[in-house]
Image: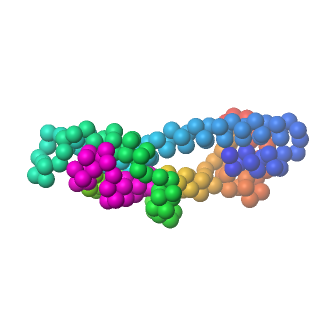
Amino acid sequence: MRALTVGLRTASNRADREFFQEQLDLRRRLLLRDIGVWGHYVADGSQPMHVSVHFNGWGNYPNPNNYTNAPIHAPFEGSFVKSFVNERAVRAALPRYRDCGCQIEQRVHDYLLTTLGMVERAYQLAPSTSNYTTPTPAAVGFVTQRVAAGAAEMRDMVIDAWTASGDWTVGYPAIKVSDIESGKVKVTRDSFWHD
C-alpha cells in the first residue's frame, strides 16, 4: 500500500495512474479482509480459556480449588460480553501502545502467556456470576480488561506491521519501500511487472 500510494501520487501518465489506483484499491480490500481474519485470532488470544486445557469447565484435572466444571466458555465470551461489557468501558481500559521491541513471534508468545496467567481468575469469578450469566463488578471489570487486551494487542500489532513495512520490499527486482517513499527510487508500473 505504501509503495502503491507513492506510485499513484508520482505517476507520470494515465496508464500508470490507473494501474496504481486499481492495485491500491485491491490491496485495501485485501488488507481489510486480512485484518478481519487476523483480528479474530488476536481477540481469541485474550480469552483465558482459549490458551488452556481448562477450555470449558475445569475438566478432569486436579482441582484443589473446586473450580466449576460447568460449560462457562460460551457465556464468558458471548452473552456476558454482549450484556455487560460496553465499548466505552473497553476504550477506557485500553492501555497505551506498547512497542515490545521484539519480533512478532516473541510478541505473540508474551501476549498468550499473559492470557494464560488469567485462567484461574476466570474460574475464581465463575461462582459469583452464576457461571457468567449474571454480572458482578469484579467479573465485568475482568472481562472488560480481557476484551481491551485483545483490542490493544491487535492495534499494537497493526502499528508494528505498518512501521516495519518501510523496510520490506516490493516488485522484482526487489525495491525497498522506504526507498520509494524517500524518492530514492521512482516506482513505475514496470516495477511491479513481475510481482
Quarter residue 142 falls in: bottom left
- Taking the spot 24% from the left edge, 53% from the top edge, the residue there is 128
Residue 73 screen position, x and y as percent: 31, 41
Is residue 194 on the magenta stretch?
no
Q: Nearer the viewer, residue 84 or 152?
A: 84
- Taking the spot 69% from the left edge, 36% from the top edge, the residue there is 26
Q: Is residue 100 left or right of residue 77?
A: right
Q: Please say whether residue 141 is visible from this viewpoint.
A: yes
Q: How is the image coloured?
A: rainbow
Quarter residue 16 falls in: top right
Is residue 143 on the magenta stretch?
yes
Q: Is residue 161 left or right of residue 194?
A: left
Q: Is residue 43 left or right of residue 34?
A: left
Residue 171 screen position, x and y as percent: 68, 41
- Taking the spot 72% from the left edge, 41% from the top edge, the residue there is 24
Residue 158 screen position, x and y as percent: 55, 52
Q: Nearer the viewer, residue 111 or 55?
A: 55
Q: Nearer the viewer, residue 161 or 74?
A: 74
Q: Which residues are magenta?
A: 123-150
- Taking the spot 49% from the left edge, 44% from the top edge, the residue there is 39
**Which quadrant is the C terminus positioned in?**
top right
Q: Is residue 154 left or right of residue 22?
A: left
Q: Nearer the viewer, residue 154 or 9?
A: 154
Residue 100 screen position, x and y as percent: 45, 62
